[in-house]
Image (cartoon, rainbow, N blue to C red):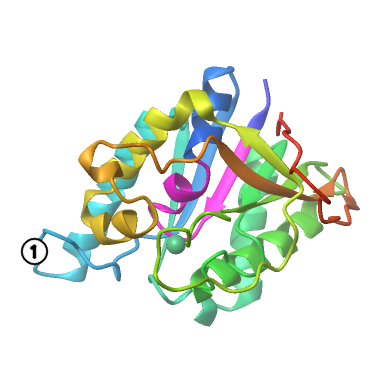
Amino acid sequence: MKRLLFIFPHPDDESFACAGTMAKYHEAGHEILLICATFGCKGKPGGFTFTCREELANHRKQELLQAARVLGVNETIFFGYPDGGLAEVDVAELTARIRAYLLELKPDIIVTFPPDGVTGHPDHIALSRATEQAVLQVEQTKPCDFYYVSIPKYYDHCADQGPKPAVPITGKVDVSRYREQKAEALRAHESQIYSVNRAYPGVMQGDIGVICHYEYYTLIRSHGEPIEPKPCGGEIPVIELV
Ligand SMILES: [Zn+2]
């Protein structure tokens, strides 16, 4: 049994990026852990009325816990930083916080967003940087594989375009059997209906046609050594994280 740790800034990032992977490796008997750095209380609460930030934060926390149940996440850890404020958190503090969990949980595989943050969101970028620093600080003690997860199809259904990807994608995990679970996890983030509809139109209404059969990764460090990500000439190879 391997232990996989997913580190994301907002409730819903996990479902957008790698819900299929989480469900797949849970079913294969591995342990799935999730760190969520904020309560995501800046998101537009579609269809809901909240009297205060705390109420929205608590609601989003419950939505994430529901998505985590759907995906078989064994433990969800909340850091509770302000949504939209990760870039203002001292990078050493954020790194130390992640490092403490890496030392305690001793994951075999760590996954976070790439340095471009996929969407360019400052929270995504800040957490990616801090996670990489934390991995560098602990990998001699506890070797692991460190992956970025990308969402190359994120902007397929959006009018705008994302930032230029910072690293090439080097592998894709086949999640065809877990698309329903991914849809259910996305639907758990009910208050995020606007974002879900933007990237995954139809899913909230029960049509999973836009959910891709693959989720996309870049192996960036393995057992204490950097891996130079090389752009795939043709088709991205199918890989397993475990
Ligand atoms: Zn996010």
Q: Is residue 83 visible?
A: yes
Q: Secondary structure at mark 1?
A: loop
Magenta-drawn segment: 4-18
Could you say where residue 175 lies in the image, as x and y percent from the top left? 55, 30
Tally of numbered discs: 1
Q: Quadrant of ligand 1?
A: bottom left
Residue pointed to by mark 1: 49
Could you say where residue 21 lies in the image, as x and y percent from the top left? 56, 34
Could you say where residue 29 lies in the image, as x and y percent from the top left? 58, 17
User: Which of the image's four quarters has the N terminus?
Assistant: top right
In the figure, residue 127 lies in which quadrant?
A: bottom right
Q: Nearer the viewer, residue 30 or 121?
A: 121
Residue drawn at (82%, 56%), measured in percent from left and top?
A: 231
Could you say where residue 6 lies in the image, as x and y percent from the top left? 57, 45
Q: Nearer the viewer, residue 156 or 228?
A: 156
Crowd band around label 1 with a 10 angstrom C-alpha radius: few (<14), some (14–19), many (20+): few
As drawn, the residue found furthest toward the bottom would be: 88
In the figure, residue 72 lies in which quadrant?
A: top left
The vertical placement of 177 against 46, above or below, is above
Residue drawn at (39%, 70%), measured in percent from left and top?
A: 159
Please tell me whether residue 50 belongs to the stretch shown in magenta: no
